[in-house]
């Protein structure tokens, strides 16, 4: 069997290789010794002295601390919604005060305590300093609590025949527009004792009892004191 010989490959010319010495031997560039870079001092902002900077930092820190302290004090002094209480209602009965009995056998209220239109002048905004209870003239009036009669006579302020009982601890009851009195000044009275009769004397439009409760000289709402 004949075998064909493989054709010989002639070697081509070799590529030239770079010389390492030539690559590393780059010429050095040096600046002339007598060349100076331009510098403009007028365009440079000078920094503040260190001591001035420290003072400004301390002042700013102190102001922040003061504002934080003021805020904390204000928050502590203001009650939270759960701590806030509604203002006391006018005529509120102090805790532990006496309870008053009804001054009439039949308590038919016709005008409560508070601002109203005056039945005499028709003007709005009048403060009605007590509670009116309608009843027939001559009906017995009773002491709402034990105490001492300190006034029994004519009241020039419109109360007509007026009687006042001192119950102690700054509490007084007044009975106005009476027909007559059954007790005198200085007399001790018991709760439920007869003291006068219903009338229509003074600034009155009909037979009724104008009943007041005074606490340290100030009129309060009898509704908070009466037990009926």
Image (cartoon, rainbow, N blue to C red):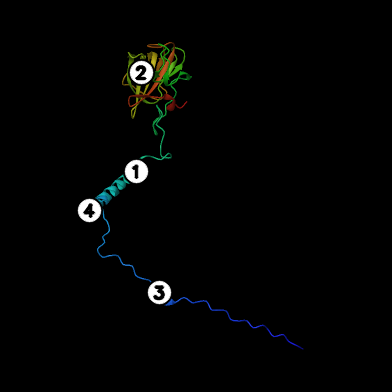
174 w.r.t. 69: above or below: above
- Quadrant of the rendered image containing residue 182: top left
Q: Earlier in the sequence, mark 4 or mark 3?
A: 3
Real-space Cα distance between discs 4 and 1? 31 Å
Q: Earlier in the sequence, mark 4 or mark 2?
A: 4
Residue corresponding to mark 4? 51
Q: Earlier in the sequence, mark 3 or mark 2?
A: 3
Real-space Cα distance between discs 1 and 2? 56 Å
Real-space Cα distance between discs 4 and 2? 83 Å
Mark 4–mark 1 contact, CB under 8 Å?
no
Mark 4 or 2, closer to the camera: 4
- In the drawing, what numbered circle is on residue 2? none
Q: Earlier in the sequence, mark 1 or mark 3?
A: 3
Residue corresponding to mark 1? 71
In terms of secondary structure, where does tag 2 sit? strand
Mark 4 or 1, closer to the camera: 4
Mark 4 or 3, closer to the camera: 3
Residue corresponding to mark 2? 163
Real-space Cα distance between discs 4 and 3? 55 Å
Q: Is residue 5 left or right of residue 226?
A: right
Mark 4–mark 2 contact, CB under 8 Å?
no
In terms of secondary structure, where does tag 1 sit? helix
Crowd tier of the residue under label 1, counting other residues whose Cα lies within 10 Å: few below 14, some 14–19, many 20 or above: few
Residue corresponding to mark 3? 24
Real-space Cα distance between discs 3 and 2? 128 Å
In terms of secondary structure, where does tag 4 sit? helix
- Residue 34 placement (x, y as % from top left): 24, 63
- Quadrant of the rendered image containing residue 33: bottom left
In terms of secondary structure, where does tag 3 sit? helix
């Amino acid at each position: 069997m004949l075998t064909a010989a493989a054709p010989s490959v002639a070697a081509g010319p070799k590529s030239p290789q770079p010389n390492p010495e030539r690559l590393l031997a780059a010429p050095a560039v040096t600046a002339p010794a007598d060349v100076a870079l331009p510098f403009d001092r007028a365009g440079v902002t000078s920094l503040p002295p260190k001591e001035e900077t420290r003072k400004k930092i301390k002042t700013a820190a102190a102001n922040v601390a003061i504002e934080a302290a003021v805020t904390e004090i204000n928050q502590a002094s203001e009650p939270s919604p759960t701590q806030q209480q509604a203002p006391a209602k006018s005529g509120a009965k102090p805790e532990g005060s006496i309870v008053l009995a009804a001054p009439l056998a039949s308590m038919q209220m016709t005008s409560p305590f508070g601002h109203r239109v005056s039945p005499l002048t028709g003007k709005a905004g009048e403060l009605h300093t007590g509670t009116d209870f309608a009843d027939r003239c001559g009906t017995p009036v009773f002491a709402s609590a034990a105490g001492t009669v300190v006034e029994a006579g004519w009241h020039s302020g419109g109360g007509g025949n007026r009687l006042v009982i001192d119950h102690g601890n700054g509490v007084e009851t007044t009975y106005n527009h009476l027909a007559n009195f059954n007790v005198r000044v200085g007399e001790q009275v018991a709760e439920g004792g007869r003291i006068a009769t219903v009338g229509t004397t003074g600034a009155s439009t009909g037979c009724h009892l104008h009943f007041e409760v005074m606490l340290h000289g100030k009129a309060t709402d009898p509704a908070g004191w009466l037990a009926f």
